[in-house]
Image (tube, rainbow, N blue to C red):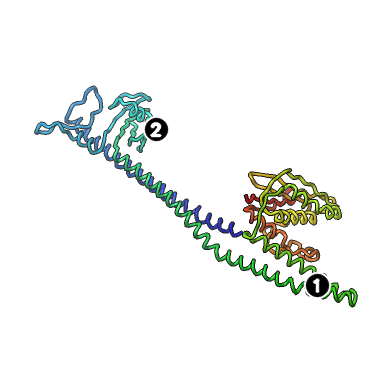
Amino acid sequence: MLKQLENRIRRMMIIPMTLLIVLIGAASIYMNYENAVSNAIETINRYSVISSDQTTDGETQHGEPPKPGGAESKNGEEKRDGDALSEDFGALYEFTVKEGELTYQSTDEDNIVSAALSLANENERKGVSKGYFYRVQKTGKNSYNIKLLENKELYSRFIRSVLIITVMMVIGVLLLIVLAFIVAKRIVKPVAENEEKQRRFISDTSHELKTPLSVIETSAEMQETETGKTKWLTYIQNETESMSKLISRLLLLSASENKDEESYTEFDLSSKAEMCISTFEALAYEKGVTVVSAITPDMRFFGNEDDIEHIISPLTDNAIKHTPQGGKVYVTLLSERNEAVIRVQNEGEPIPDEDIDKIFDRFYRVDKARNRSEKRYGLGLSIVKAITEKYDGNIGVKCENGLTTFTVRLKSKK
């Protein structure tokens, strides 16, 4: 129960906070992407302005779009505006595509041409592709003007920002997981301490009650030998027997919840299960119930044999007592995903929906009047659940198709 509570607290912390971190990270990456693309488009636009100036001041050959560059300086130096821009902002490549065919290209490099052609299939847009910043403008039907900017510094900054944000997201999630484990343990710690105090109280009180109860039982037997059996002595003996049974169950529950004081060995789980089922043959015959078992042979298990008995016996006992005359009880043992699976099914009235979540609580009884008359205290399923959790397993109940099914999954301690 505590482990489930711990896991629930962790999930409540980790899932929403992880989503928040991912959303913040994704938003940051998108903003960096938009910023890088905006800077690149600004550079492309500056190239375009210079190209327009060249078209006005210089000559173009063969009707090709002008390349970046300006007129020579007055002092005869060959450095032009486009060259300076290229040095500062990278290289610009321009392409004209019509009907899927290139009608103009400013370079013959295959990788750049391939990148340009892959972009000539949509309307106007801008972004990053294959290491280039691009702007696509539709100039007519199936006709596009594509400009690719190769700016290694701007592209490197963008990639660096993406990597940094991703690393920060991973670190944030890892720190969140560590924090969730610490917080969950601190929250559960007082509950665990309180549960341990309750367990010790039950154990100590049960042990203390055994002595006076033994005295009462012995005194009643002595009185019976002297005065004979009377109804008052019968009442005392019946209630003493009932109290002894209750104390034994409480001690068993306390022992089941103690995970530290255990000695485990490897044993034949199949044989143990068959032995437990065989002890209920007389009870089943008396009630007119048929017990059908399907036990996987030669299953080995590392644990405590008594624990297996305290799981199978109460489940089988309950199943027989809640099965109408002529009905059937099915007990199955099999192995699934390295787990031992014990399944007990019985025909009869289903457990009411409002009781399903409560039947594993201590002292909870669905039919209180009947269980009290049969001296049943609502501890059997609590013991089964405590033992199941000790083996890092789980127990579930399902009512459908006229069958009530209890399924226990256990993990070997080895």
Front residue of this view, candidates 270 and 153: 270
Say what secondary structure mark 2 lies in: loop
Classed neighbour count for the residue bearing mark 1: other residues with Cα under 10 Å, few (<14), some (14–19), many (≥20): many
Look at 74% across and 53% down and name the residue there: 312
- What is the x, y in percent for residue 95? 31, 28
Give me the residue at 71% from left, 58% from top. 381
Question: Quick one: SS at disc 1?
Answer: helix
97 or 118: which is nearer to us?
Answer: 118
Residue that extends furthest to the right in the rendered view of this protein: 228
The circle drawn on residue 122 is: 2
Residue 140 visible in the picture: no
* Residue corresponding to mark 1: 217
| Amino acid type of the residue that numbered disc 2 sits on in the rendered structure | Glu
Q: Quadrant of the N terminus?
A: bottom right
Q: Image quarter for residue 153? A: top left
Instruction: Quadrant for residue 234, please give it.
Output: bottom right
**Alpha-carbon span between mark 2 and mark 1:** 94 Å
Please state the horizontal and vertical placement of residue 19, each as a whole percent of the image: 47, 51
Disc ID at residue 198: none
Instruction: Tell me if 299 is positioned left or right of 185 in this view.
Output: right
**In the image: residue 200, left or right of residue 141:** right
Instruction: Name the side, left or right, on which 147 lies relative to 413.
Output: left
Q: Nearer the viewer, mark 2 or mark 1?
A: 1
Does the CB distance between marks 2 and 1 fall below 8 Å? no
- Total numbered badges shown on the rendered structure: 2
Q: Nearer the viewer, residue 363 or 296?
A: 296
Q: Residue at x 79, y 74 (%)?
A: 216
Residue at position x 75%, y 55% in the image: 313
